[in-house]
Image (cartoon, grey):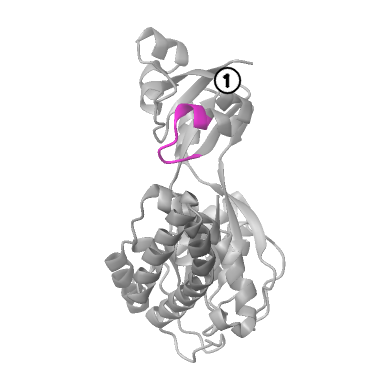
Amino acid sequence: MKAGIVGLPNVGKSTLFNALTSSKTAQAANYPFCTIEPNEGVVSVPDDRLERITKYIVPKKIVPAALRLVDIAGIVKGASEGQGLGNKFLSHIREVDAILQVVRCFEDSDIVHVAGTVDPLADVEVIETELMLADLQTLDNALPRAERAAKGGDKEATRRVEGIKLCLEQLGKDEPLRKLQLDPEVAKAISSFGLMTAKPILYVANVDETDILGQGPLVGKLKAFAEKIGAEVVPVCAKLESEIAELDEADRKEMLESAGLNEPALTVLARAAYRVLGLQSYFTAGVQEVRAWTVPVGATAPQAAGVIHTDFEKGFIRAEIYSLEDLETYKSEKEIKAAGKLRVEGKSYIMQDGDICHFLVNS
């Protein structure tokens, strides 16, 4: 699963990406289209539960969950018609699972805004409009082919035609596809299109150092809009975060305290992106390593085992599961078992966020 960082040119996308991935490469110059091919990176998802587990099970290694990020070039008005290499950039968005839109929420005369004025809602509208227009083009082009295939009795094509028409109707009302509830089979039939406005979205308010907590009027406008559509906003000062990312642990802590932050805003952002992607973590814990594994919300125990190794899903027998709260109460797996708190779950078990697991499988 991966999230794409998008936005207008010069809103701080690449600065944010470099900070998230702790990249120490030179920042792009202050010009549109600095990023042409998308950069990809992996960021750890901070989780204090790992440290809590290691108080009782001391491992040689701790491995947090990871999130793949893609830094996509700035989208401009007219991108859906090819402006600013827009078609190429939009194709990169089709390949991600969620969108993190960086929205400029600061004034700075030294950094040119492509529209000439800073207006978070106008920026959001430009990106959303271009993505909707691109989705319309995709669906309009796909409909004749799907209709021809459906006439031949292809059930998958029939579902595809139904999905395309429902999506076109939604877009015709100037509504993004993420608000549209489709039958799972119909959604599956059109999933190959990579429809961009169907992807979940998280807004990243890029603020300056005078509004670290995002309490200013520009962020306020963005939050009010996001609340109406059921989205989340995370305020981040990309400039400050990029400086923090370059520091060692001691200096980082000091800089955070001086800025009035308990943790880097990037930590909050990584966790929010994880939620937007519909992901959760379960843990394996032993003397070799304590590790967070990523599964979609709703995954079964065999599917979770398959994340460790594909053969584990095929050979799944059962899972032995306990909670972090039980570990903190009873102090060891042995005592958890003695207290009757070690659960044995079968193939139909739905994984819960934070489960600590041992899987038994046929080798």
Residue at point 45%, 32% (across, down): 52
Residue at point 60%, 85% (across, down): 83
Task: Report x, y in % for residue 306.
Answer: 57, 30
Task: Report x, y in % for residue 285.
Answer: 53, 25
Q: Is residue 98 left or right of residue 288?
A: left
Residue at point 70%, 62% (across, down): 24
Is residue 176 or residue 212 the one in the foreground? Answer: 176
Q: Which residue is mark 1?
A: 315
Q: Is residue 297 magenta?
A: yes
User: Magenta part of the protein: which range?
Assistant: 295-304
Q: Amino acid at mark 1?
A: Gly
93 lies above or below 274: below
Q: Quick check: can you spot residue 316? A: yes
Q: Quadrant of residue 335?
A: top left
Is residue 150 or residue 59 the one in the foreground? Answer: 150
Farthest residue, direction front: 152
